[in-house]
Image: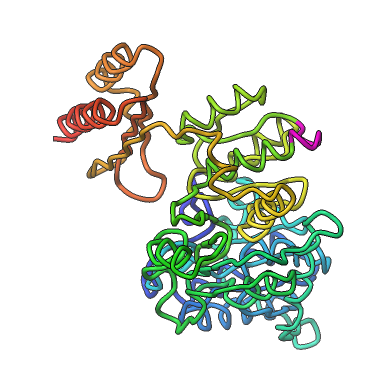
Amino acid sequence: MARRYFGTDGVRGRVGEHPMTASFALQLASAAARVLAPEGGTVLIGKDTRLSGYMFESALEAGFVAAGVDVILIGPLPTPGIAYMTRRFDCDIGVVISASHNLYDDNGIKFFDASGGKLSDELEERIEAELEQPPLTRTSRDLGRATRADRMRTHYQEFCASTLPPGLDLSGLKIVIDCANGAAYKVGPRILADLGAEIVPIGCSPNGRNINDGCGSMAPDLLQLTVPGVRANVGLALDGDGDRLVMVDHLGRIVDGDQLLYVIARALQQAGTLSGPVVGTVMSNLGLEVALRAAGIDFRRAAVGDRYVLSMLRETRGMLGGETSGHILCLDKTTTGDGLVSALQVLAVMKQTGRPLAELASGMRKFPQVLLNVKVAERFDPSGVPAVQQAVARIERRMAGEGRVVLRPSGTEPVIRVMVEGRDEGTTRAAADELAAVVKGVVG
């Protein structure tokens, strides 16, 4: 069964346009209750800082309560915080109202199961099937109850802090933290401050409309200026729902998800605690693969999307994986990608070794990588187009094993993503332009 509403990360869209309406959110809650808590139970609902979050929170609350499910409203909390709290308080369902790194015009609704994991495709299909039924309203004696529990977020703060090695704190580190005016704006600075760090917060003043707007992991320019400007040791930037992380070294240079994976992997290896391969994606920089191979660490590539990274980690019994964008999975610490937990692992390495982030990341040389988006009227699989495949083969022959070509349709936009990487930036860009032109020709 093809899913109509669930994408790679829940239901998402422009607020006010189907399916991101209050009426659909109520219907979705009722359908989810019938599938995930048919005999009643408890759902934890959290959100980021978008203005529309209030509307969707109320609609979801009504749908779940009417279906006989108790509701706990925890307010703004990072997506991984909802995953942890769902598990911590034995809830049957966790719900996050967020559109992640998108601007405030969009919003989304995503679910966790009782273990704090993302729903399987099969469960999402069952929920979609239930959307054909009208929302359920039980009799008065069987309705659920709703409670607000904002103070419960301290449990998540304590959990994050507990992922540091015993006895280690962050005293002596000056850290700039950019929370993208999003879900982590309260807990992020508090966690770092409670651990003894001197903090400089930016992107921590949400107004309902400024989430991800010129700040956070998608726009770290201000962080890059602020870190050397205030002579901080390091900076970290989260996205609007707190599951992505990029960092900035003391010189103001970006350290992306691939480089952070390298730093954490090498630290785990040196501590003798790394198990299984490190898992990236087909878009992970070739430099990460080369650096890990040189260190004797196995590296595997999954499809793009943290759910596919997680699936491969489980298949291979790995514990560490992630994406260039900063979705990092530390399965020895938590069940899902968590920007704050990942940041703490890197900060712990800095504190234990006394080495700056710039030095820790220097063991990985990033290959020049050019990514071009070719707009198309309809998505198609470029691997099935002979002209495109001939161009790919021609470029790969010229690279002689020292580069990669990746073509894939976007899962969220009507574009074909053309990625080429190699040792030389000029020839890499020329190859990407050449391939993009071929794809455009096919579209035309």
Q: Residue visible at 30% across and 47% down? A: 414
Is 327 or 99 nearer to us in this picture?
327
The x, y position of residue 128, in whole percent, is 55, 56
Is 25 or 89 nearer to us in this picture?
89
Q: Quadrant of residue 199?
A: bottom right
The x, y position of residue 256, in whole percent, is 49, 47
The x, y position of residue 327, in whole percent, is 56, 50
Q: Is residue 18 visible?
A: no
Q: Quadrant of residue 168?
A: bottom right
Q: Quadrant of residue 294?
A: top right
User: Is 166 positioned to the left or the right of 71 in the image?
Assistant: right
Q: Is residue 267 above or below residue 87?
A: above
Total numbered circles:
0
For the record, the magenta segment spans 269-275
Q: Residue visible at 53% across and 54% down? A: 9
Name the quarter where the C terminus is drawn: top left
Q: Is residue 7 above or below residue 226?
A: above
Q: Residue visible at 41% across and 14% down? A: 401
The x, y position of residue 22, in whole percent, is 48, 78
As drawn, the residue found furthest toward the bottom would be 140
Q: Residue visible at 86% across and 60% down? A: 167
Q: Does 273 lie within the magenta span? A: yes
Q: Does 72 lie within the magenta span? A: no
